[in-house]
Image (cartoon, helix red, strand yellow):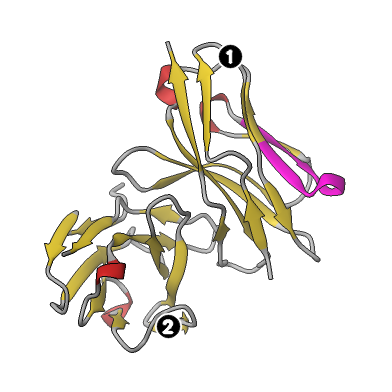
């Protein structure tokens, strides 16, 4: 069965510092990988996704993630944190190449940004 | 373009009472999903619809949960009777053939 592990339920950084949120997946087949962000009392918003092709994926709000097959990882980074980045972040995996898919989510990482 | 709409946003009920959640997907999205999100956890799929058909309901506790998507647009998720452990956020999402799922704001259910 597919699974996603997010290391660190809570990450705290200073404004302007590097953001690194970790995600590892278990898979016997090539996965599709996603990062979602959830602001308080809101639904999830897609930050970026990897399906095929270039392993470094750029998303919205300055975030990017790199798919490393050898490490089964898809860590999310941002060079300089902004106060507005404070939210919960979810990594998700899917294996469907069809028109719709089933997402399996990690438990999430709460990012706080200190002034 | 309007996003996924859910109502109510918050609901407080006593255990053993019934409750229903409503979802209006993005116009033209043929696929609709209901997810359960427990506190401190990621969303878990309850049921997925392709138009009117429930194509994946393997995670839906059918003894107390039911769902419908009449006419392949709006959907309703019902719990009867509710239990204390059902307290959670219920998320609805929709997608079209481009694969991305768009999520609504969710309904936060509290069972007392």
Q: Of circles 2 and 1, which is in front?
A: 1
* Membership of A69 in magenta stretch: yes
Magenta residues, dominant SS class: strand
Q: Residue at x 29, y 69 (%)?
A: B86
- Residue found at the far bottom of this picture: B63
Q: Quadrant of the C terminus of chain A?
A: top left
Q: Is residue B79 above or below residue B8?
A: below
Label count reads 2
The N terminus of chain A lies in which quarter of the figure?
bottom right
Residue A77 in percent (x, y) is at: 64, 28
Residue located 26% across and 65% down the image:
B23
Relative horizontal placement of residue A65, taking residue B84 as reference (left or right)? right
Which residue is the site of mark 2? B54
Give the residues in magenta. A64-75
Task: Check the residue under mark 1 and report the chain it is in.
Answer: A
**Local SS, label 2:** strand
As drawn, the residue found furthest toward the right would be: A70
Label 1 neighbourhood size at 10 Å, few (<14), some (14-19), many (20+)?
some
Report the residue marked by disc 1: A17
What SS does tag 1 mark? loop
Left or right, B84 with respect to B93, comes to left
Give the chain of mark 2: B
């Amino acid at each position: 069965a597919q699974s996603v592990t997010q290391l660190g339920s809570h990450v705290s950084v200073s404004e302007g510092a590097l953001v690194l949120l970790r995600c590892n997946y278990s898979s016997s087949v090539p996965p599709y990988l996603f990062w979602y962000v959830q602001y308080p009392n809101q639904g999830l918003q897609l930050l970026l996704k990897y399906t095929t092709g270039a392993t470094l994926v750029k998303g919205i709000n300055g975030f990017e993630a790199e798919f490393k097959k050898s490490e089964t990882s898809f860590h999310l980074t941002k060079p300089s944190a902004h106060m507005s980045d404070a939210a919960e972040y979810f990594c998700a995996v899917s294996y469907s190449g069809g028109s719709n898919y089933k997402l399996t989510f990690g438990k999430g990482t709460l990012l706080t940004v200190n002034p | 373009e309007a996003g996924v709409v859910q109502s109510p946003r918050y609901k407080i009920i006593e255990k053993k009472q019934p409750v229903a959640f409503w979802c209006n997907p993005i116009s033209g999205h043929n696929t609709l999903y209901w997810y359960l999100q427990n506190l401190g956890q990621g969303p878990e799929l309850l049921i997925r619809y392709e138009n009117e058909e429930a194509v994946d309901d393997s995670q839906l506790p059918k003894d107390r949960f039911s769902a419908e998507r009449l006419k392949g647009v709006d959907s309703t998720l019902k719990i009867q009777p509710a239990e204390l452990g059902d307290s959670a956020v219920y998320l609805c999402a929709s997608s079209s053939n481009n694969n991305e799922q768009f999520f609504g704001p969710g309904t936060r259910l509290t069972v007392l």
